[in-house]
Amino acid sequence: MLISQKMNTAINEQIGREFGAFLQYIAVATHFDAQSLPQLAKHFYRQAEEERDHAMRFVRYLIDAGAKVAIPAVGAPKSTIASAEAAVQLSLKWEQEVTKQIHGLLELALKENDYTTQQFLQWFVEEQLEEVSSMDKLLSVVRRAGEDGLLFVEEYLAREGGGEKS
Ligand code: FEO
C-alpha cells in the first residue's frame, strides 16, 4: 500500500462526505425543479454530478494506491429548502467546509511526507477554489435578485453557459 492506514481512513471518510454532497445537491436541484426553475435545477444537478466525480476520484486513488475502499454510511440530505438564498448559502457553507477538509488531508499528507497524496490532492485544492468562488458569485446574484426575481437568476445562469459553473 502506497499510503498510511491513517490516510486510507481519512480518504474513506472524505468519500462519504463527497457522496453526502452529491445527495444534498440532488435535493437542492429537485427543489428548484419542482418550482419550475430549470436553470437553477440544472446547475445543481451538475454540481451533484461533480460531487459524484469527486467521490469516484478518491475511490480510484485508493484502488491505485493499493488501499482499501470502505465507504461509510451517508446521512440523508436536508430536503426542506426554505428559499433559494438559503439553498445557495448552505451550498457555499458546504464548499467552504469541504475546502477545509481537503486542506486537512493535505496537512496529513505533508506530515507523513506522503508525496503521492500531496500531488493527488492538488487537483482538489484548485477545484475547491473554483467551487467556492462560483457559489459565492451565485449567492450574490440570488441576493440581488431576491425571491421574486429568480427569473433574473435563471437568465444569469443561462447566459453563463446553460447553468454550468463559470
Ligand atoms: Fe466535492 Fe463541491 O466539493
Image (tube, rainbow, N blue to C red):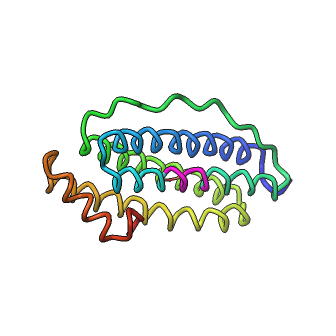
For the residue pair 103 and 142, the one nearer the viewer reads as 142
Q: Quadrant of the C terminus?
A: bottom left
Q: Residue at x 59, y 57 (%)?
A: 106
What residue occupies the far front of the structure in this picture?
Answer: 36
For the residue pair 70 and 142, the one nearer the viewer reads as 142
Taking 97 as reference, is 115 left or right? Answer: right
For the residue pair 117 and 156, the one nearer the viewer reads as 156
Q: Quadrant of residue 28?
A: top left
Up-down relation of residue 105 to residue 156 (above or below) = above
Q: How many marks?
A: 0
Up-down relation of residue 120 to residue 12 (above or below) = below
Q: Residue at x 26, y 65 (%)?
A: 156
Q: Position of residue 48 (x, y in %)?
A: 50, 50
Q: Residue at x 35, y 50 (%)?
A: 92
Q: Position of residue 57 (x, y in %)?
A: 67, 57
Q: Residue at x 24, y 38 (%)?
A: 83
Judge whether residue 43 is colored magenta. Answer: no
Taking 132 as reference, is 48 left or right? Answer: right
Q: Position of residue 123 (x, y in %)?
A: 58, 67
Q: Quadrant of residue 165?
A: bottom left
Taking 49 as reference, is 65 left or right? Answer: right
The magenta region covers 48-53
Up-down relation of residue 49 to residue 79 (above or below) = below
Q: Position of residue 49 (x, y in %)?
A: 55, 53
